[in-house]
Structure formats: C-alpha cells, structure tokens
Image (tube, rainbow, N blue to C red):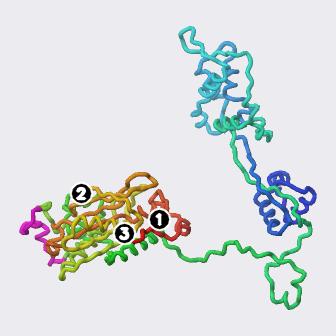
Amino acid sequence: MAYHFDAQQLLNILAARDTFQSNELTEELAIDHQRLIGAIKSLQVKDGLVNTTEVKIRRIELTEEGEEIIQKGSHEFNVYKIVGEKGITKAEIDVKLKLLFTLKDPFLCQKTPFGPIGLGKALQCGWVGMDTRDGGVPVVMRKVAHAEDGLKAQLQLVKDGKGDQLPQNSVAQLKKRKWITESAIKALSVAKGPNFTTSMQKQELDLTSEMISSGSWRGKQFKQYNFSAMGVPPSAGHHHPLLKVRAEFRDIFFQMGFSEMPTNRFVESSFWNFDGLDEFCTFLERSFKHSSNLSNTRPAILMTHFSFQSRRFPLNSRRSISKSYRYDWKLEEAQKNVLRTHTTAVSARQLYLLAQKPFEPSKMFSIDRVFRNETLDATHLAEFHQVEGVVAERNLSLAHVIGLFTEFFRKCGIENLRFKPTYNPYTEPSMEIYAYHGGLRKWVEIGNSGMFRPEMLLPMGLPEDVSVAGFGLSLERPTMIRYGISNIRELFGHKINLEMVYRNPICRLEQKSD
C-alpha cells in the first residue's frame, strides 16, 4: 500500500532525523520516488527551509538469468560437476546443460549455446581439459580436484543489495554475460536549512487591492517572483524548415536581380516536360521508371504556332553544325500528361514567352515541387523541391556561367567549388557542381548546370546569338545539412515529427559580405 504524504509530513520526518536520502526514504515508506522528489522540490522554493544536494547512486540488479544462476550455479561450474571423474564428450555436456537451464522462452533456450559457453569458460579457468589420447572422440576431463563457483557468490552479493562491493571488472563481466543490469539513478540528499521549521505558513501569490486597503498584507508571506522562469510560449504556427531555407534562397535570387517564374503547374504535358527540352523518347527520365504518367486525362492542348516540324526534325534547315538526336517525334506522346519531373519545364515555357517579343536579357528562378517515380529511402523521395535559375543573354560564355554560379553559392556561404563535366540531354556543355564539405572532409555534389542546346532554343524563336545558362539543385539537401537531419523522410512527408518543426530555429545562411 502506498504511503500518502505531503510537504508537512516530510518536514516532520526531517525534524526527527536531521537528514535523509530520497532513495532510502522511498524504500522505507514504499512510496513513488518521483512523488517524493516533487514534495522535496516544493520545500526548496522556500528560502532556507531545507538544503538539498543531488547524488548519483549506482544500482545493480539481477536479471532473470542471473536469478537462475544463483539457484543452479554458473555454466562453467556445472560443466565441472557434469564431467565427473570419468570424463564426458562435448555433445553430452551440451545436452545436459540445456536440460538444466530452462529459460521462459523455449526457442531462446534451444538457440543459446550453454554447452560451448560453459566448456569454454571452464577451460579458461583451468578446471577441465581435453583428452584425445585414444585418437577417438575428444573427451573432457577434470584437471583440478576442487573448484569454487565465484560467479555465483558475486551474484548472491548483488541479490543481498551489496553489489557496490564488487570490483568494476567483475561487474563488467557479469553485465557482459547478461546476468545483471547496471543503472545510475539520481537522488536528493535533504538536510535542515538555516530557516528550518515544521510550521508552514501558506505563501500568498498575489498582492491584492483588498490586502492593501485592509492592511492584512503585513502579516502574510508572499512567494518571491522567479524572474529567470520561462514564459508560456504563445500558441502560434511555425514555419517548416524547408520554408525557412526557401525564403533564404529567394532573398539571394532577388539580391542578384532574378525574377520569380510561376510554378503553379504540377501537371505538365509531355511536350513541355520532355520535347520542349529536346529529350528524345527513349531517354531514361522519360520512361516509367522516373516519370508518373496520368491516366484518364484529356490530351494536352498544344500551341499550334509552335514549330512542331522543327521539333520533329531539329535544325535540318538551319545553319548549325549539330544534328540533334533526330528522333521520331510523335504528337500522341507529346500530348500525354505527366506529373512534372523537373521545374525546367517551367523554364522552357518562360523562354518560349521570352522569344515572342523583342529580346531582352533576363534572369529568372523558380523553387517548387517536382515528382519522380523513385524508390523511397533515406536520401530519395517521390516528391521533393527543385531550385532552378536560368540566365538568357547575348554572347554568354561558360566563363560567365561559372562566375554566376560562384557568386550564387558564395552568397549561400559556400566558396570552395569545383565544376566537373557531365552529360545532360538538353545542355551542352554541362557541369556538375561540387562543394567541399568540411564535416565529411570530401567533395559532395550540390547541383547541376549547363548551357541550353541551340536545338532547344532556336525552335522557340530566340535569336541565334542568345545563349541561356541554367543550374539547379534540390531544396532538401541544403536543408538537411543546415538542420543536421540524416534521413530525408524525417524532413518531408506524412511521418515527420511536428516537434521538429516547432523547435528548429530561423534559417540564416552564412552569407559572405561583398
């Protein structure tokens, strides 16, 4: 039966003893330790009433298997007893020990190698040895006339509450064999304070106008204000970490003179998602492995004034050294609707609109969701965010592009960059962007980039001397690095912990000053 007590009873106990330790009083009165700690802390707030000191206590307890060892002896000592004077084979030892030790779980009992464990330990102790003199099956023989089961004696000390008398190496050995568990508990040592008394007077929380007018406040004690206490957090919404990093990226783009592209088309036609970027029909990203085709939808309505013929036979009639992919373009394939696999489809639409009026240099960016038919794991999702920027200008060179990327990532706090040639179906030349990760001590890929191919730009109607550079990266990877998240599924999706959203701070990228 639990002992019900209050702070007054605790003061009476302290008056009789001068001091006590919370864990010992818990066992004596059969009360919950946390309830006792709560009562002690209610006395701590009264100045000088009690003095408390936190103590750490090592607790060693027997496991179920440890209890069985106390009853039957250790495995090695039982091997010594089973061997006897005549000796015995290893197989017989294994059978007899399994019959002797019966854990609650029969399957676990069959799986546990009691025989090999006991024999190995007995051999280490020098109690038994292997006899192969006859050249037949090895026989286990005794090597000493007498043996003491020291492990059983050590476990008996633990059972008697004297486990703290065991040396640390013995404790480590018993823990390794899962016969004991060791834990550390925190307790409070309580003693009388300079203002100790057993007569408690209720402290008033507020000074009211009635107390002042009547003068009754003079005979009352008031609880002191705790100016270091945390206030109640306001009930308000919180921005997701992805939104915080997204806001930082948008600010950087705006600082560099970019304008934001509309990204409200999650469903895109295959024409703009693939053909508009000069991705031929057999390209891997166009296959069902990466794109998600939509069923039961009407064919997309394509703009007839776009040059379909130039898309079917790119640049055949133009002055160009490139022959493009020369794939067999099919209208029915171009009209299929898909969930967009990249925001480059948005860039293609905007470049087409840019070509419909007298050309003006343009810098545009977008940050929004894209969809891939991917296998989900710690670093891949079927739905994620892509950050993309494009720059259209006359006589744009690769050196300009590298300078642009360097400036963008410098503003993101990343200065140590490398560019590696790669292949993209709609850019040439193409480059992967790597940054040195100080924590991992290696170069990691952070983005992809390149110059859009003329086969993509000229059919849109852009002048031949106009070049367009583009680069992209995911929003999730820098967010995971910024907030120390190792599994992308903990960042985005239906299984995220809302506490993670609440506690993560505002994102401030370490932007380098100009």
Task: Looking at the picture, tell me which residue is in the foreground, 95 or 211.
Answer: 211
Residue at label 1?
Answer: 494
Does 221 sit left or right of 265 as displayed? right
* Residue 136 found in image quarter: top right
Residue type, numbered disc 3: Arg
Mark 2 against mark 1, which lies toward the viewer?
2
Q: Along the polypeptide, which appears first: circle 3 or circle 1?
A: 3
The quarter of the picture where the N terminus appears is: bottom right
Task: Looking at the picture, tell me which residue is in the foreground, 356 or 399.
Answer: 399
Inspect this view and state whether residue 376 appears.
no
Residue type, numbered disc 2: Tyr
Residue 328: within the magenta? no
Does 496 sit left or right of 415 as displayed? right
> Residue most toward the bottom?
213
Q: Secondary structure at mark 2?
A: strand
> Residue most toward the front?
514
CA distance for labels 2 and 3: 24 Å
Residue type, numbered disc 1: His
Does 195 sit left or right of 223 as displayed? right
Residue at label 2?
Answer: 423
Residue 319: within the magenta? yes
Instruction: Determine contact: label 2, label 1, CB under 8 Å.
Output: no
Residue at label 3?
Answer: 369
Magenta stretch bounds: 303-322
Q: Name the residue at 24% across, 75% down.
A: 349
